[in-house]
Image (cartoon, rainbow, N blue to C red):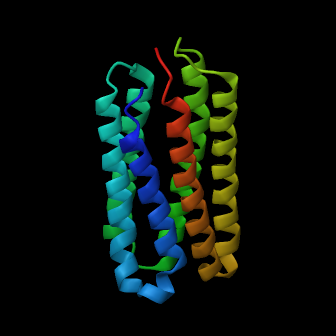
């Protein structure tokens, strides 16, 4: 799995999406409403391109196709269906919770698949998944009383998801079946 550039680009677009959320007041809500879904969709496309470049690895291929599809669907949902910040934050909470759970299960699936997977990589994916779950709880708890703070936490968690994707890409660069 040495073709990681598309996975790194997927992570970078998540980082950019989180930054757009953090600076949405400065750049204008209208532009942010366009950029955030666009960047999620772009991130999903890069995740799928990464999977297609690494067809020899069954479980990572399945995970990254699924991850890419979920990112694209989330981008479409928030681009089309969210008419308010409240709905966006609710969708984001469930999306981040889902990705967190999925990261945890993915690490264990790889561990049991015969894939060259170390406990260090498993621990990294598991911690990232739990942090995603905690992030979704923080978004939910904060959004109830202060939507702007909920948006800031969503931006930070999205940036962390992107960084996790980039770091993970560098960790799997030398992984083999």
Nearer the observer, 149 or 88? 149
Residue 147: x and y, percent? 60, 80
| The quadrant where residue 30 appears | bottom left
Nearer the observer, 83 or 152? 152
- Left or right side of 126 for 109: left
* 152, above or below 91, in the image: below
Count of numbered circles in the view: 0
Residue 98: x and y, percent? 54, 47
Residue plotted at (35% across, 49% down) = 44
- Left or right side of 36 for 143: right
Residue plotted at (37% across, 53% down) = 43
| The quadrant where residue 121 appears | top right
Residue plotted at (34% across, 53% down) = 72
- Left or right side of 71 for 26: right
* 10, above or below 108, in the image: below
- In the rendered image, is residue 134 in sight? yes
- Left or right side of 141 for 78: left
Nearer the observer, 97 or 4? 4
* 147, above or below 75, in the image: below
Residue plotted at (29% across, 32% down) = 52
Residue 127: x and y, percent? 70, 41
Name the image quarter holding the N terminus. top left
- In the rendered image, is residue 87 in sight? no
Residue 18: x and y, percent? 51, 66
């Amino acid at each position: 799995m040495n073709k990681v550039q598309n996975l790194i680009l997927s992570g970078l677009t998540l980082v950019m999406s989180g930054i757009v959320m953090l600076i949405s007041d400065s750049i204008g809500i209208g532009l942010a409403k366009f950029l955030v879904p666009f960047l999620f969709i772009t991130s999903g496309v890069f995740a799928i391109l990464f999977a297609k470049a690494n067809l020899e690895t069954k479980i990572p291929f399945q995970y990254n196709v699924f991850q890419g599809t979920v990112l694209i669907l989330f981008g479409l949902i928030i681009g089309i269906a969210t008419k308010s910040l409240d709905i966006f934050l609710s969708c984001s909470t469930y999306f981040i919770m889902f990705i967190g759970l999925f990261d945890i299960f993915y690490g264990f699936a790889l561990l049991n698949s015969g894939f060259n997977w170390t406990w260090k990589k498993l621990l990294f994916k598991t911690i990232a998944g739990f942090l995603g779950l905690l992030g979704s709880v923080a978004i939910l708890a904060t959004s109830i009383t202060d939507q702007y703070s909920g948006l800031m936490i969503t931006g930070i968690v999205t940036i962390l998801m992107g960084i996790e994707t980039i770091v993970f890409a560098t960790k799997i660069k030398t992984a083999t079946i």
